[in-house]
């Protein structure tokens, strides 16, 4: 990553966008030395797209079904990122496996946040998986993205105890931990 004064990052998201919003707020507050130059989303009706519009963040929103292959839409994503000199890609609830084109273009510069202590409970519905298993210690992981689902090198983790089984309460707790851990990790990665 270059030592320029203000870095450029892109956030990829498909859903509610609470992490996206937290990152943009941290950027606007000067807490993170980076501009969120782009939101990439595969879900035009996602709340995150609305938040991006309200916060004035540029978007590239696509529907995978409009493209012949993952390679095709990922080439476009790379183009949008490069046009804005994006250095770091932060996945935040992006519900697609990242493919070869993106991984090669942004080697070592794509990170993801996952709502469990990996390698436990990889994949979808991690919070529900953990609750159903009956764990008493929950947590969050930030990791590099590679070709394996939730399998890249771990960068940061944070654990906390919770004895209940209220998914909604737990999700709120997890999001709170995620927002801080993701921002702290992005700050470190950009140094
Ligand atoms: C987060 O829990 C994140 O860990 C997972 O997807 C969720 C996205 O939440 N990968 P939000 O859209 O940022 O609110």
Image: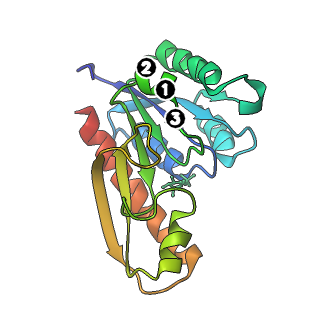
The residue tagged 3 is 98
Contact flag, marks 3 and 2 (Cβ < 8 Å) = no
* 2 vs 1, front mark: 1
Q: Could you tell me which residue is drawn at 54 percent across and 37 percent down?
A: 12
Give the secondary structure at mark 2: helix
Q: CA distance from mark 2 to mark 1?
A: 8 Å
Q: CA distance from mark 1 to mark 3?
A: 7 Å
Q: Could you tell me which residue is drawn at 35 percent across and 46 percent down?
A: 143
Q: Compared with residue 96, is residue 65 higher up or lower down, i.e. above or below?
A: above
Sequence-wise, which precedes: disc 2 or disc 1? 1
Q: Answer few, some or many: residues within 10 Å of disc 3's Cα (few below 14, many 20 plus, some between 14 and 19).
A: some
Q: Could you tell me which residue is drawn at 46 percent across and 58 percent down?
A: 122
- Residue 63 in view (yes/no): no
The circle drawn on residue 100 is 1
The residue tagged 2 is 105
**Which one is in front, 17 or 127?**
127
**Which one is in front, 18 or 162?**
162
Give the secondary structure at mark 3: loop
Is ligand 1 closer than 8 angstroms to the Cβ of mark 2?
Answer: no
Contact flag, marks 1 and 3 (Cβ < 8 Å) = no
């Amino acid at each position: 990553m270059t030592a320029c004064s203000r870095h450029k990052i892109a956030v990829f998201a498909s859903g509610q966008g609470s992490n996206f919003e937290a990152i943009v707020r941290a950027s606007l507050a000067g807490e993170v030395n980076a501009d969120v130059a782009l939101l990439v989303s595969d879900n035009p009706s996602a709340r995150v797209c609305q938040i991006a519009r309200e916060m004035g963040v540029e978007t590239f929103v696509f529907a995978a079904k409009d493209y012949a292959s993952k390679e095709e839409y990922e080439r476009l994503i790379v183009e949008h990122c490069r046009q804005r000199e994006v250095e770091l890609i932060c996945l935040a609830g992006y519900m697609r496996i990242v493919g070869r084109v993106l991984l090669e273009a942004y080697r070592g510069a794509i990170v993801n946040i996952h709502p469990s202590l990996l390698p436990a409970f990889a994949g979808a519905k991690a919070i529900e998986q953990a609750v159903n298993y009956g764990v008493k210690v929950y947590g969050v992981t930030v990791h590099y993205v590679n070709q394996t689902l939730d399998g890249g090198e771990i960068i940061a983790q944070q654990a906390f105890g919770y004895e209940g089984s209220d998914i909604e309460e737990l999700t709120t707790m997890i999001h709170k931990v995620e927002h801080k851990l993701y921002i702290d990790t992005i700050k470190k990665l950009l140094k």
